[in-house]
Amino acid sequence: MAVTTERTAMPDVDRTVRAADDAFEAWERHGRTGRAEVLDAIADRLEAARADLVPVAERETGLATARLEGEVGRAAYQFRLFGTVLREGSYVEATIDPAGDTPLGRRPDLRRMLIPLGPVGVFGASNFPFAFSVAGGDTASALAAGCPVVVKAHPSHPETSRRSYEVIRAAVESAGLPAGVIGLVEGHQAGVDLVNHPDVTAVGFTGSIAGGRALADLAAARPRPIPFYGELGSLNPLVVSPGAAAADPTGIATGYVTSVTGSLGQLCTKPGLLFVPAGPDGDKLRAAVADAIATTGPGRPLNSAIKDAYVRETGRRRDDARLTLLGEGATAGPDEASPALFTVAAADLTGDLLEECFGPTALVIGYDNVDELVDALRRLDGQLTATLHVTADETALRDRLHDVVRRRAGRLLFGGFPTGLAVAWATHHGGPYPSTTLSGHTSVGATAIRRWLRPVSYQDAPADLLPAELRDGNPTGIPRRIDGTLTI
């Protein structure tokens, strides 16, 4: 992708970003409470439009009605969550160090908080037409921060994107705010121009490693580089200990296959690697996994590109001498993809087998001993999640595995399965590269707002100039740190 400038950008991108920049001050001045009210209004309007939005998304994506209805609810919940974050106020990290004597001499009055960056770009994801697209968490968190948002619609669901945009814009305009608080652009070149536009201050992205890395490189190559918060690819290893394999092979197998094939495996949290011990108990687990996958049917991928890539990759895996087909689902039709699981020895888990395959497929890796398991886990790059199924009396094994996976994953599960992600204050949806480009941040949960903020420190500032969050007496009533002590 070639670096472009404002002068060569598509007119609609330039116009949309300029409108966002023009709206920035009005949106920031609307204040935390005012923005929270708009976010609540967006949530209400999304839920009211559910009956209109879901059929369009179902037609464009092939995802099930129940899944999409739940996703609209999740999108609305995210907007309300960030309304709560705004009202609570601790996210601004208000810090006050009053003037006074220190061992290093006289200190001036210092007051620090986080403020919004400015207009930001958001890329809609293919696999979540609501919760990670126009009405997704990136949009909600950026709007909460005080940043106008320009969304680049995903081509897999253009009409869903347009209608979601109209819902948000209606809430913004009903509050008497400039329409530029939310914008929408479409097309491949529009995405390139959005990243390169000089008025864009940061970008959020969920998608492939190749696409995300190309855009991240563009963001870094700008005359004024900007942060690129990309969620790219993850294998999400799930480890079953010898004790766990013996205790519940059927339950683990059923849960695992459900996790791999849910939404046709088109989830960034799909557990694409299952580590199973050698021996009779491991054999029982593998047999149960094969039985479970045989009862699953095919489905329609989100788009033809995903389907073609899946067919190519599973075909390559069938021809790979290192792999053995463990089991597969019912035969797929012309526009469908069928689940397929393959086994491989831990020693052979190298090279291209450590690359994500988007869709209902996974590798079941056999390990002979703990050292072999640990060695295989250490070959993994950064992951969004890592899951350990161990029994209560395997604490030494649990602790050893924890030390390995904690360095590689952003969310650690002890039991359960990683698909399905709570939207909460303690959520972290990120991890070392390539799962995300900046592992210190999350794209889901309350702290996702931190991506769209920067600190500013006031030194000996006039009292009437200070933001309300930093004034004496704490007129907004938010948590603050004063002279090193946190006050609630």
Image (tube, helix red, strand yellow):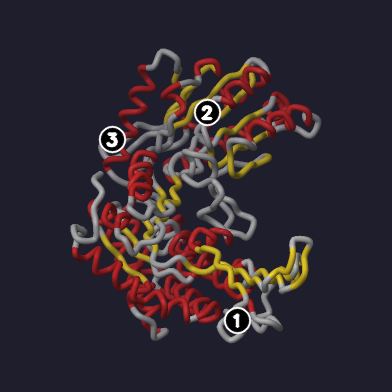
Residue type pointed to by label 1: Ala
Disc assigned to residue 347 = none
Q: Nearer the viewer, residue 237 or 254?
A: 237
- In this rendering, the answer to whether 211 lies above or below 295 is below
Residue type pointed to by label 2: Asp
Q: Residue at x 59, y 55 (%)?
A: 422
| Distance CA(mark 3)–CA(mark 2) | 26 Å
Disc assigned to residue 468 = 1
For disc 3, the marked residue is 308
For disc 2, the marked residue is 291
Q: Residue at x 68, y 27 (%)?
A: 241
| Distance CA(mark 2)–CA(mark 1) | 62 Å
The quadrant the N terminus occupies is top left
The quadrant the C terminus occupies is bottom right
Q: Position of residue 28 (x, y in %)?
A: 46, 76
Q: Nearer the viewer, residue 116 or 84?
A: 116
| Residue 142 located left or right of residue 248 | left
Inspect this view and state whether residue 301 appears.
no
**Camera-nearest label, 2 or 1:** 1
